[in-house]
Image: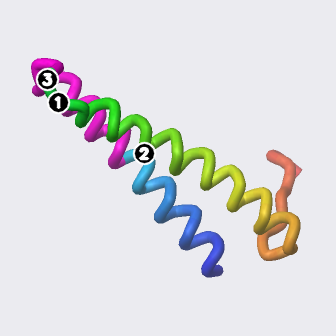
């Protein structure tokens, strides 16, 4: 259960950083690096989430299943 909560929290953080990147891209005039920082965080969180899911599956804490089975 804790692994699923961690995955949902990571997805929420990824969506937040994606929205922040979009907001900063629309509002800033290019003088600050907030857009790049937000999108860099999003990429880092996405890679971390993929690695975490692989680790959770390896440990047997979550079980993959096929769609429609």
Neighbour tally class for label 2: few under 14, some 14-19, many 20 plus, Cα within 10 Å: some
Q: Earlier in the sequence, mark 1 or mark 2?
A: 1
Q: Decide: is 12 above or below 31.
A: below
Residue 13 location (% of width, % of height): 41, 55
* Disc ID at residue 32: 1
Mark 1–mark 2 Cα distance, whole angstroms, equals 16 Å
| Of marks 1 and 2, the one in the foreground | 1
* Disc ID at residue 14: none
Which residue position holds label 3? 31
Q: Nearer the viewer, residue 26 or 67?
A: 26
Q: Nearer the viewer, residue 68 or 59?
A: 59
| Of marks 2 and 3, the one in the foreground | 3
Q: How many marks?
A: 3
Q: Nearer the viewer, residue 8 or 49?
A: 49
Q: Is residue 41 left or right of residue 22?
A: right
Quarter in which the N terminus is drawn: bottom right
Mark 2–mark 3 Cα distance, whole angstroms, equals 19 Å
Q: Which quadrant of the view contains residue 17?
A: top left
The answer to whether marks 1 and 3 mark residues whose Cβ atoms lie closer than 8 Å is: yes
Which residue position holds label 2? 41
- What are the residue bounds of the magenta stretch? 16-30
Q: Is residue 23 left or right of residue 5?
A: left
Mark 1–mark 3 Cα distance, whole angstroms, equals 4 Å
The answer to whether marks 1 and 2 mark residues whose Cβ atoms lie closer than 8 Å is: no
Q: Is residue 47 highlighted in magenta? A: no
């Amino acid at each position: 259960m804790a692994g699923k909560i961690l995955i949902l929290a990571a997805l929420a953080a990824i969506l937040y950083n994606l929205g922040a990147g979009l907001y900063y891209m629309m509002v800033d005039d290019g003088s600050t690096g907030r857009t790049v920082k937000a999108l860099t965080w999003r990429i880092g969180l996405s890679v971390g989430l993929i690695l975490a899911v692989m680790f959770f599956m390896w440990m047997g804490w979550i079980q993959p299943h096929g769609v429609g089975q």
